[in-house]
Image (tube, rainbow, N blue to C red):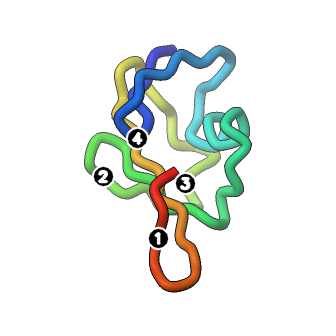
Amino acid sequence: MRLIVNGEKLEVLNVETLQDLLKELQIEPQRVAVEINVSIVKKSDYSTFKLNEGDRVEIVNFIGGGYRWI
């Protein structure tokens, strides 16, 4: 599946859900906020939120004093 993650083209295999993508990217879900096609996804929906070819994914990692784009 081809996605755009934080502005970069990315091709992933065996990824169906947002949770799968975060695992593939080795990102801790508890520490990020995720937007898919300009809509924020609730953390409780990460495991069921299905990704589609061409989705635009923005992942923001919050740190003390602000945030950092991943």
Toward which corner of the image does residue 55 lie, by quadrant?
A: top left
Q: Nearer the viewer, mark 3 or mark 1?
A: 1
The tag on residue 67 is 1
Question: Where's residue 17, x and y in %?
Answer: 58, 35
Q: Nearer the viewer, mark 1 or mark 2?
A: 1
Toward which corner of the image does residue 22 lie, by quadrant?
A: top right
Mark 2 closeness class: few <14, some 14–19, many ≥20 residues within 10 Å: few
Q: Which residue is mark 3?
A: 45
> Do the CB atoms of the residues marked 1 and 2 lie less than 8 Å apart?
no
Q: Amino acid at mark 1?
A: Tyr
Secondary element type, mark 2 = strand
Question: Where's residue 48, x and y in %?
Answer: 58, 43
Give the mark nearest the N terminus, 2 or 3.
Answer: 2
Q: Amino acid at mark 3?
A: Asp
Give the mark nearest the N terminus, 2 or 4.
Answer: 4
Q: Amino acid at mark 4?
A: Asn
Question: Where's residue 39, x and y in %?
Answer: 30, 52
Identified at 36% across, 57% down, the residue is: 40
Q: Which residue is mark 4?
A: 6
